[in-house]
Amino acid sequence: MAWDTQRAADIIETYKHLDGPALPVLRALQLEFGYLPDEAVSQVAEALNLSRAEVHGVVTFYHDFRREPGGRTSLKVCRAEACQAMGGDALGDEARRRLGVDWHGTTRDGEVTLEPMFCLGLCSVAPAAQVGDRLVARADWPKLEEALRKCRP
Amino acid sequence: MPSVTRIYVPADSAALALGADEVAAALAAEAKRAGAAVEIVRNGSRGMHWLEPLVEVQTASGRIAYGPVTAADVPGLLKAGLLEGAAHALRIGDPAQHPFLARQTRWTFARCGIIDPVSWDDYTAHGGGQGLARARTLGAKATLEAVTASGLRGRGGAGFPAGIKWRTVHDAPGDTKYVVCNADEGDSGTFADRMVMEGDPFALLEGMVICGLAVGARKGFIYIRSEYPRAIAVLEHALVVARANGLFEDCAIELRIGAGSYVCGEETALLESLEGKRGQVRAKPPLPAHHGLFGKPTVVNNVLTLATVPEILLRGPEAYAALGTGRSRGTLPWQLAGNIKHGGLFEAPFGMTLGEIVDDVGGGSATGRPVRAVQVGGPLGAYFPRALFDTPLDYEAFAARDGLVGHGGVVVFDDSVDMARQARFAMEFCAAESCGKCTPCRVGSVRGMEVIDKILAGRDVDANLSLLEDLCNTLRLGSLCALGGFVPYPVMSAVRHFPQDFRTP
Ligand SMILES: Cc1cc2nc3c(=O)[nH]c(=O)nc-3n(C[C@H](O)[C@H](O)[C@H](O)COP(=O)(O)O)c2cc1C
Ligand code: SF4
Ligand code: FES
């Protein structure tokens, strides 16, 4: 969604009263707009009485926060040890090859962004992945493809 | 009125990832078609993840389990008489009698998988709330004594005695104090916090309120990682129900969600993050117990630490302290992960050996190939070869062998593993997650990757191996926190126990 100053102001207002509001505010903004453009940094800085550098520092520290829009669906593949033990590396390689993107990349049609993850807490049913909000255990490419299909409108 | 049959279909993330929602939907649809009245309860997981989705039916003679069930199995199961607990190829029988569960000693996981996680009635019918009632009767001082007497140590990794931490916060001057639950659970191979939050969230909330009463804190925060959407949803629901049932009269609890950062599991980085800053580690002292969230005295405890306290007060600290070995008292919920046949959660007193839990309980590898290496204690834990399978599972015994119990994750690898690649990954992970404060960690981890790459390419192997060891010593001695400080464990254990993998021709 394109940046909307009024909508953003409403969201900031909802969380501003919290102790230490920066993360809840940024998270809510990203959920709404899909990413955090420069306008977000400026507006949050002003509303929370922080410097732009401080807010920028926070946004760039955390893996979750995006500075550019991603694809319509995110495909997260676990790269951590328990999944490695069950072929997680090969699954990550196959996902990159099939989608024609590297980690953090978005397919040319803007459909899918491929994200590396370090553990989804599904280490007993590895390898694990998440497609949109669907969790996938004992994942292989056909399972991921099917989950991606279910995410299409 | 026709009688309604209760069916349990777990909504634990592991079950969901294996199709539990589809199974629940199929059960509802097929039961309706057959004119059978059923109530489907979405419980947590019993922890036998290789049997998920594990469907249970309440029958006249107790609960009967079937698993692993797929949506396609449902019509056949109903036809065979699932609602009466009848025979079927997938029938497990009474889940509590299953050897994997019967061998366990459950305290932290006493209710998980049994109750409806967000039903207050179910919770209180299974002992919930009694620990808090006991704490109210005892008062702050005697509650602190009980927690100390139980021998409970922090389950987040460092193993610090919970009672001593609580007393420090209790004794610290000031009116405003906080309880912070560390639900960042970033270690690969661990999911016990997630299972508690999804399967028995009130136990965690009750433990936090007991802590608040004991130390004099009226406000608590749960800091949960964003990678746990299901646990977040269950906790949000549980908070509403608990509030309506008056749980937060003395200590109010708020949920905060992380933003993807492993180092934010380190307690001072977590506090920075809660305050809305970059998750950078603070120098200690001052300890969070003296100078924690917003500068106030703060208890930071792991989910398991806090969620075990109600059960300890209910059943008595002596009974908990009677379990375990040496200075490792009570039980630990071990998490069997990776290439293992019977993956899942196994709560047992400290003292079993690594070999027992991997081979006997876990059934060896999932692939059926020989088990070659086991990483215990997350990404900063050592890799142990079979030769160390006699190591007892307790904090001191692992430390004595340059290993780590950590949060109790046990990640199994078969003989296809390349330990030099695992060592490289440890450095890569450290580089990706470093908070950037110390040079050895920030720069040394990247150097470590490069050195291992050279070793993998067969270049100056001896010289590069000794360079790697030097680097590890620098990291060990020059890092502010255990991310940089402990990454030498996986790296050097791989070098020491699997030297041949670093000399591939
Ligand atoms: C890099 C790093 C990551 C950590 N991650 C976690 C975590 O995810 N969960 C946790 O409870 N403790 C974690 N810890 C340990 C905490 O710093 C702290 O010891 C713990 O929360 C204290 O609670 P406890 O005494 O109940 O274990 C981590 C420590 C380090 C150095
Ligand atoms: S060791 Fe690494 S993560 Fe820990 S404080 Fe230093 S730079 Fe940060
Ligand atoms: S290591 Fe992949 S889900 Fe935990």
Image (tube, coloured by chain):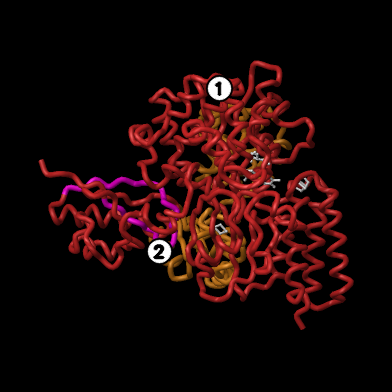
The quadrant of the rendering that contains the C terminus of chain A is bottom left
Q: Nearer the viewer, mark 2 or mark 1?
A: 1
Of B322 and B216, nearer the camera is B322
Residue annotated with mark 1:
B213
Residue B89 x %, y %: 28, 68
Residue B328 falls in image quadrant:
top right
- The answer to whether B10 is drawn above or below residue B131 in the figure is below
User: Distance of mark 2 from mark 1, alpha carbons?
Assistant: 50 Å
Cβ of mark 2 under 8 A from ligand 3? no
Q: Few, some or many C-alpha atoms within 10 Å of disc 1 (few <14, some 14-19, many ≥20)?
A: many
Query: In the rendered structure, which segment of residues is drawn in magenta?
Result: B37-57
Name the residue at the bottom extreme. Answer: B505
Residue B360 x %, y %: 52, 64
Q: Which residue: 41% across, 36% down?
A: B237
Q: Which numbered dot is residue B366?
A: none
Of B362 and A126, nearer the camera is B362
Q: Which numbered dot is residue A149?
A: 2
Question: Label 1 is found on which chain of the structure?
Answer: B
- The answer to whether B128 is drawn above or below residue B9 in the figure is above
Question: Is B151 in the magenta?
Answer: no
Chain shaded red? B
Q: Are marks 2 and 1 in contact (CB under 8 Å)?
A: no
Name the residue at the right extreme. Answer: B463
Residue A66 in view, yes or no: no
Q: Are marks 2 and 1 on the same chain?
A: no
Residue B166 in view, yes or no: yes
Mark 1 lies on a secondary structure that is helix
Residue B365 x %, y %: 53, 70
Of B330 and B479, nearer the camera is B330
- In screen coordinates, is B450 left or right of A70? right
- The answer to whether A87 is drawn above or below residue A133 in the figure is below
